Image: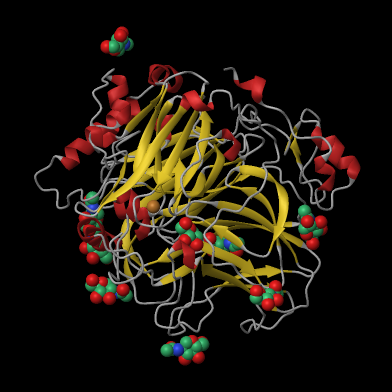
Amino acid sequence: MVLPSIWRLAALGWAAQVAGLPSNVQSGSLNTRQACTNTPTTRNCWSNGFSSSTDITTDWPKTGQTNTYDLRITNTTCSPDGHSTKMCQLINGQYPGPTIRANWGDRLRIVVHNDMPDNGTSIHWHGFRQLNTCQNDGTNGITECPIAPGSTKTYEFVATQYGTTWYHSHHSAQYGEGVVGTVIIDGPTTANYDVDLGTLPLTDWYYNQTWMLLSRVVNFGAVPQPDTILVNGTMVDGAGNGHYQTLNVQTGKKYKFRLINTSVDQQLHVSLDNHPFTVVAADFVAIKPFNTTDLMIGIGQRYEVIITADQAVDNYWLRVTSGTQCNGAPRIYGNTSLVVGGILHYEGASSSNPTSTSFNISTDCLDESFEPFVEHTVPSDTFASQLGELDLSFDRTIIRWSIDGSPIDVDWERPTLDYVQDNDTAYTTSMRVFEMTQPNAWYFWVIRNFDGIPIPHPIHLHGHDFYKLGSGTGDFPGTISALDFDNPIRRDVAMLPARGWLVIAMPADNPGAWLCHCHIAWHVSQGFGLQFLERKQDILGAIGSLDSMNEGCIEWERYWDSPNRPYKKEDSGLRSVGPTDISGPGAGV
Ligand SMILES: *[C@@H]1O[C@H](CO)[C@@H](O)[C@H](O)[C@H]1NC(C)=O
Ligand SMILES: *[C@@H]1O[C@H](CO)[C@@H](O)[C@H](O)[C@H]1NC(C)=O
Ligand SMILES: *[C@@H]1O[C@H](CO)[C@@H](O)[C@H](O)[C@H]1NC(C)=O
Ligand SMILES: *[C@@H]1O[C@H](CO)[C@@H](O)[C@H](O)[C@H]1NC(C)=O
Ligand SMILES: *[C@@H]1O[C@H](CO)[C@@H](O)[C@H](O)[C@H]1NC(C)=O
Ligand SMILES: *[C@@H]1O[C@H](CO)[C@@H](O)[C@H](O)[C@H]1NC(C)=O
Ligand SMILES: *[C@@H]1O[C@H](CO)[C@@H](O)[C@H](O)[C@H]1NC(C)=O
Ligand SMILES: *[C@@H]1O[C@H](CO)[C@@H](O)[C@H](O)[C@H]1NC(C)=O
Ligand SMILES: *[C@@H]1O[C@H](CO)[C@@H](O)[C@H](O)[C@H]1NC(C)=O
Ligand SMILES: [Cu+2]
């Protein structure tokens, strides 16, 4: 099936409802070929004929610009909330790492230096489509060997999408130790604002070393409770050390900021007292704006929100709470009476903590629902013939999650792309390879969650914004009437409900080896993942050269095969963190 025949563009009538935009600007910006400029009252347009109405799956600005960043990862110590210092692994000595910023259509060239004495690394650029550049996806054991201590790898790819995302280590427990940062790709927005406040990453945080805890997760299956939640890398601790993240605003202006859940385990609800959110983007997809007082953000998910500073000059709590139905319990270690979150501070208000009243915040663990701004229809005629079934299970004796009977366990010395260049199809069972062979055909997958452990999982796919056709509790009814093919949600992380199902779809339009996994860090360490090997016959032609991967593998093998290497691989190799409290909710998971 050829793609353009099934796309259709945004309904012309709708966009006039976008908050605050004059109608003359609206109709102008809907012409994707018209020139326009991005100003506080015309955020819908971008430049030289690119706007929110541009279909990013087929079109993006060819800027010719390359933005270069250097990231150095070191083994060090940190104390983001003023609590006692712990071992950390940081990027350029800071937590979170530097924000990478570029314009839509720019090329990113990011040089990663592994300056740690005794750990590999591999950096994944979460949500980037990596169109024809899957060798830069940063997934060790699949698209590269880990970067050896003392070595460097240059990642290069084009930002075909715009919006907010993050990057993180995909090397076992490392991201829980601090190897994460945020990314802003500037582009249009589906509602207006005056000031962009930047990124607000939210994460659970553990005072114990995640590497130490990893052993307990993979060997004993214990799920920890985090000690606290960090908002943009900061928080107060139970004894009053540290400080809250403050968002500074002036009365009358509209502000955009970008919420990112970079947790290893916790699904969070976010709410700002007295200030509803206008939500304009989910993951890397511009959406029809909707208003809400409470957002549930699964691990890896992002939302861009706009607030209006139209309340009394004062301070207001930004609250970050847990969906208890997500199995979580954000709190500040040692002091349950403290608010977990940050502070919205109006110019002219005092510097004391807020006394504002919370909106009602849900405890559910359900994805938000919304509609993408650029409308796509997924064909349903091939659904029955192209549906693949992926059954999740948990084996308590080996403490591993399995997809269709086996956990994933990647080989750091032999990534999948090495099989591709060798034309070797003797994939091992633990690689969990599922092939998508037909160019541009639609593939449909139902993931079923009936293994007896009733918890939801945030499912993330590399290399695609997938279409979420439906999800629910109970068994998948099996019929297309239970699904939404008409402009369904598309994004790169969606929740798989407890004792339920999730159906995703994507066209095979990006040759590569793409990991699909639960973004709860220790679940993927415990084997919860698979890889889609998409059009293996087209991969080498699409990506050009694997020289960089091959050089990296030689350096990695020199390190990893050395008799003096102090550490071993304990998990699936892909990502993990560890437990602190084996009696907490989810113990045994
Ligand atoms: C990493 O840093 C921690 C904290 O400073 C230290 O205890 C540990 O020995 C370091 N590891 C290596 C391999 O240098
Ligand atoms: C990475 O380093 C940490 C300590 O610095 C160590 O505990 C862990 O075992 C190492 N892991 C690997 C896979 O090298
Ligand atoms: C988050 O912290 C960084 C570094 O301190 C800062 O530049 C950025 O503005 C902060 N984000 C927000 C939304 O305040
Ligand atoms: C918890 O925080 C509150 C508010 O700052 C403070 O009054 C109280 O003393 C703290 N409790 C403990 C046990 O530190
Ligand atoms: C982050 O994701 C985790 C796991 O899905 C979730 O438990 C937590 O509530 C999310 N955090 C936010 C702020 O939404
Ligand atoms: C959302 O709230 C804003 C600000 O209050 C308002 O202007 C807009 O009309 C609302 N949008 C929707 C879709 O309800
Ligand atoms: C919050 O929920 C309670 C109980 O459902 C309800 O009585 C109350 O009116 C709600 N408050 C707000 C501000 O919506
Ligand atoms: C790869 O292997 C297949 C099956 O063994 C064979 O038909 C094909 O010619 C091989 N391709 C190359 C490039 O060697
Ligand atoms: C860290 O781990 C130790 C040993 O496993 C445990 O006793 C301790 O409670 C943990 N610390 C925290 C703050 O959870
Ligand atoms: Cu999971």
Left or right? Give the position of 333 relative to 6: left
Coloring basis for residues: secondary structure
Residue 330 makes an appearance in the image? yes
Q: Residue 148: percent from the left, percent from the top?
A: 26, 42
Vertically, is 317 above or below 479? below
Q: Quadrant of residue 537?
A: top left
Where ligand 9 lies, by image quadrant? bottom left
Which quarter of the rendered picture does the C terminus lie within?
bottom left
Vertically, is 213 above or below 118? below
Q: Quadrant of residue 391?
A: top left
Which quarter of the rendered picture does the N terminus lie within?
top right
Identify the residue at horizontal 35%, vertical 45% (top origin): 392
Q: Nearer the viewer, residue 7 or 405?
A: 405
Q: Nearer the viewer, residue 18 or 363?
A: 363
Q: Residue 470: percent from the left, percent from the top?
A: 56, 42
- Taking the view exactly as shown, the residue that stands out farthest to the left is 563
Q: Residue 124: percent from the left, percent from the top?
A: 42, 43
Q: Residue 413: percent from the left, percent from the top?
A: 22, 35
Left or right? Give the position of 468 relative to 304: left
Residue 202 makes an appearance in the image? no
Identify the residue at horizontal 56%, vertical 64% (top origin): 269
Vertically, is 360 above or below 259? below
